[in-house]
Image (spheres, coloured by chain):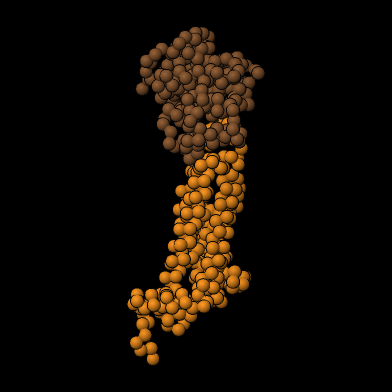
Chain colours: A orange, B brown
Amino acid sequence: MAVGIEILLVSPLAVAARLFALLREADFWSTVLFSMLRIAAGFFLGLAAGLLLAVAAGRFGAVETLLWPFVVTIKSVPVASFIIISLIWLSNSQLAVFISFLMVFPVIYSNVLQGIKSTDPQLLEMAALYRVKWRRKLFYIYLPGIRSYLISACSVALGMSWKAGIAAEVIGVVRGSIGEKLYEAKIYFMTSDLFAWTVVIVLLSVLFEKAVLFAVRGIFGRLARR
Amino acid sequence: MKNLVMERISKRYGEKQVLQELSLTLRPGSVTSVMGPSGCGKTTLLNIVAGLVKPDSGRVLGRPGRVGFVFQEDRLCMDFSAAANIRLVTGKTGKDPMMYGIFSALGLQDSIMMPVREMSGGMKRRVAIARALCYQPELLLLDEAFKGLDAQIRQQTMDCVLKWRGDCTVLCVTHERAEADYLGGALLQLGRTADREEGEQGSRFPFPSGITREA
């Protein structure tokens, strides 16, 4: 009988105690690293693909037309469906990478493309008159224009990549991941573990977001000082 | 270089006919100022000459490959330095003696690396002019390029344009007769009963001191 065990809710003290206990466990850091690396890989792949394809779509209308059905599909299909399909197609360890990528790509692509389309037409007219090469136009005119779009897209996509990545690990019961720990906490009614791991996920997500946004802002700052 | 010929140019925006059967020939290396009341088609004329706007009828012949344009708006990349804005159109990297010469002539030699966003309105105007000159155009179009500059800076800027334009053809829209006279060359008056009054030769005389800018 589970008498005296906090199941529905646990006190903050119990969560803190469990969190400190987790920090001392041998597999804590390897579990954190396992999930973080895969979710980060998915995020950066989604960021790179979203950026490159948005730039291509901004330059060639045909690319936007070709990508449109894929982007709409990714946006509207429930993430759980993708996770289950991916479980059939991919190995467990790749699951979080792929799901994180799928969450990040459409957000980055749509926002950056919107930023490119919102570029000041007067600057573009000036660049056309002065016969500015496309690479220079991209660097001096488009990149500053997409800055705010990219930062807000990253901010949204970072949170989504963690949420979807961990959800994929829970559904796929990926061995050695944070998702597996959450799954075990659910199975064995270890609510304090569930809350402690949730705190870990929130902290990792916030730290990852701060680091990525700091780097993105730094890159744009360096570009402007050239 | 060939003559730049505008043949029977007409342009209408909705109900308003802004240019009608305008014909004009600019000799290579000439300076021509265009004056006229607001809305008479001065900027439209420059846009048609630059190829940015298509005329309803008529044509432009002999448009050179390199056209420099100082627009009414500065159209600068605000996040970058003045030097970077020049690099955008010239593609030159490293120290460009011509750029430094033009910036010195404009009194901006200490502001080359300053972000454009931090510059005053007058400085931005001069950077836009420097950009057009550094491009080494064969045709330089100036649309109220000296507007917003105080008398002394304006004279300095016009001197710079005259010095660094080389042998390019200049077509300058202005509201100030004194500016047209200072630049010299022909004066085209738009918006009169006749479509143009060409060939009135402006003489070069010192810029009158204390001249005030039109509102």
Q: Where is residue B107 in the image (x, y as percent from the top left)?
A: 47, 25
What residue lies at 62% left-to-right and 70% top-to-bottom?
A89
Residue farthest toward the front in the current orientation of the protein: B110
Q: Where is residue B210 in the image (x, y as percent from the top left)?
A: 37, 15
Pick whichever, B92 or B203, lies toward us.
Answer: B92
Q: In which quarter of the image is residue B102?
A: top right
Q: Where is residue A118 in the image (x, y as percent from the top left)?
A: 48, 43
Can residue A88 be seen here? The reply is: yes
Q: How many marks?
A: 0
Pick whichever, A56 or A66, lies toward us.
Answer: A56
Q: In this view, does A60 lie above or below B185?
A: below
Residue farthest toward the bottom in the current orientation of the protein: A1
> Image quadrant for the N terminus of chain B?
top right
What residue lies at 59% left-to-right and 24% top-to-bottom?
B137
Q: In this view, does A94 lie above or below B58?
A: below
Q: Is residue A91 above or below residue B125?
A: below
Residue farthest toward the right in the current orientation of the protein: B1
Can residue B132 be seen here? The reply is: no
Left or right for A153, reference A7: right
Q: Quadrant of residue A84?
A: bottom right
What residue lies at 44% left-to-right and 20% top-to-bottom?
B154
> Image quadrant for the C terminus of chain B?
top left
Q: Is residue A196 above or below residue A220?
A: below
What residue lies at 59% left-to-right and 28% top-to-bottom?
B97
Q: Position of residue A191 (x, y in %)?
A: 40, 79
